[in-house]
Amino acid sequence: MKEAIIVGGGLAGGAAATLLAQAGRPVLLLEREAEPVDKVCGEFLSIEAQHHLARLGLDLDHLGATRIGTLRVAFGRRTVETPLPFVARGLTRKRLDSALLDRAANAGARIERGFTVRSIAPGRIDTSRGELRSDLLLLASGKHEVRGAGRDVAGCDAGYVGFKTYWRLPRRARTGLDGQIDVILFDGGYAGLQMVEGEVANLCLLIEKSRLAALGGNWAGVLDALLREPHAAALLGDAEQCSPKPLTIAGVPYGFLHRADPAETAFRLGDQAAVIPSFCGEGMAIALHSAAVAAAVIGEGARAADHHAILRRDFQRRLRLSIALQRAGQKTWSRELVLKTLRLWPGVAKHIIALTRIPSDPTDGRHHGLSPRR
Ligand SMILES: Cc1cc2nc3c(=O)[nH]c(=O)nc-3n(C[C@H](O)[C@H](O)[C@H](O)COP(=O)(O)OP(=O)(O)OC[C@H]3O[C@@H](n4cnc5c(N)ncnc54)[C@H](O)[C@@H]3O)c2cc1C
């Protein structure tokens, strides 16, 4: 069997390495970070992501993941609570990604850390440690572009900057957040706050670039604006930020969906295949789903173009809907509408959430069969 080379050891790369190695294929995974690191991510694991992780043999209880059953939306002084249609989990990416790479190594994959891929061309990979050759390349470098395989992100919604920090909350605030994810809407953006393992809270927020500039272009200005929101002030006012500097990310191409090209040989996974708006909490499910599809397609001897066509079929409708919701959510009137609707019909949230879900099984027939509809 041909050796598969995987670029990137996040969730997509780790999942693909595990599945391919379990199928008996030689796998080499190249990850540029020498050690596990924190990532900009809300760390909200949807039910679809949980299904994938369970199939990969990861035990979220054992890893210490928190449980999240309620969504609370706050806008100004008002808050609305609604049950989620599933129990979500909260777990740091540092712990999750590292557990998945351990899993891949146990399945027989060779994991090389501190190994940066500089560029790729059909059959050839230029790395920080020399050139490698393989006809089976999987690109899972997340938001980072690799020369020779840049994404075509024209027309995507890239006008946001993301920030992520961990917080130690006072006991009362911690109890108030237990079992919930809080989404705080503020002028020009929104923040998600939830507990992860180790009794810390993950604060992850997105803000429009123009609003960030108006706030001084820095974290101090953003935090100041957030803490002027009564709900954020109640939870974070007396809390301690675990590290002085947040992690940041800019220019995430929301709505990106790779187009199948018959000439393409690399299999794109995760954010290299599709990027769904963060508020959906489905980016990790996309990463895991794309890895499962790639492993199945490779197992059947099919081509990268088939893989990309299947992903397009699985993701397109959900991406369109979630981008429309993200755009609508920028308007004050629509935020008012969301709050009123949730208050009057809490069940509506479940339907909207259901419409933006990603398939959790690439092999369960009717919806996710492996032959792309052409
Ligand atoms: C603000 C924000 C909040 C989010 N919140 C959530 C959420 O709550 N729930 C959710 O499900 N999703 C969320 N997401 C989306 C989710 O984080 C991503 O979709 C997911 O991490 C994609 O996984 P991946 O494996 O494709 O990429 P990554 O997890 O980014 O992994 C890519 C890996 O490739 C490595 N790499 C990059 N370039 C190279 C190279 N040249 N050579 C070698 N290695 C390389 C990187 O070091 C990294 O480890 C959020 C995203 C953002 C921006």
Image (cartoon, helix red, strand yellow):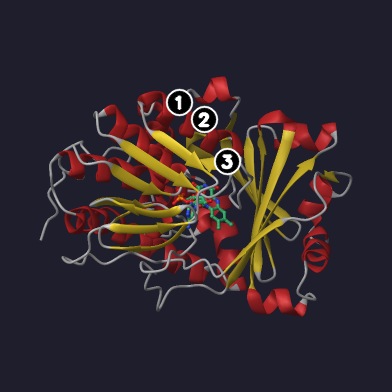
Q: Residues within 10 Å of mark 2 (few under 14, many from 20)?
A: some
Between 36 and 354, the one lying in front of the other is 36
Please give the label number shown on residue 18: none
Residue visible at 80% across and 66% down in the picture: 225
Whole-percent x, y for residue 111 in the image: 45, 37
Secondary structure, mark 2, is helix
Secondary structure, mark 1, is loop
Marks 1 and 2 sit apart, C-alpha to C-alpha, by 8 Å
Residue 238 vertical placement versus 158 (above, below):
above
| Residue at the farthest top position | 62
Beta carbon of the mark 3 residue lies under 8 A of ligand 1: yes
Give the quadrant of the C terminus: bottom left
Query: How many labels, in total?
Result: 3
Whole-percent x, y for residue 138 in the image: 32, 51
Between 298 and 53, the one lying in front of the other is 298
* Labels 1 & 2 near each other (Cβ < 8 A): yes
Residue identified by numbered label 2: 99
Single out the mark in the foreground, 1 or 2. 2
Secondary structure, mark 3, is helix
Residue 297 vertical placement versus 254 (above, below):
above
Single out the mark in the foreground, 3 or 2. 2
Residue identified by numbered label 3: 93
The answer to whether residue 89 of the structure is visible from this angle is: no
Whole-percent x, y for residue 87 in the image: 50, 32
Residue visible at 26% across and 67% down in the picture: 259
Please give the label number shown on residue 58: 1
The tag earlier along the polypeptide, 3 or 2, is 3
Q: Amino acid at mark 1?
A: Leu
Q: Amino acid at mark 3?
A: Arg
Whole-percent x, y for residue 172 in the image: 83, 34
Marks 3 and 2 sit apart, C-alpha to C-alpha, by 9 Å
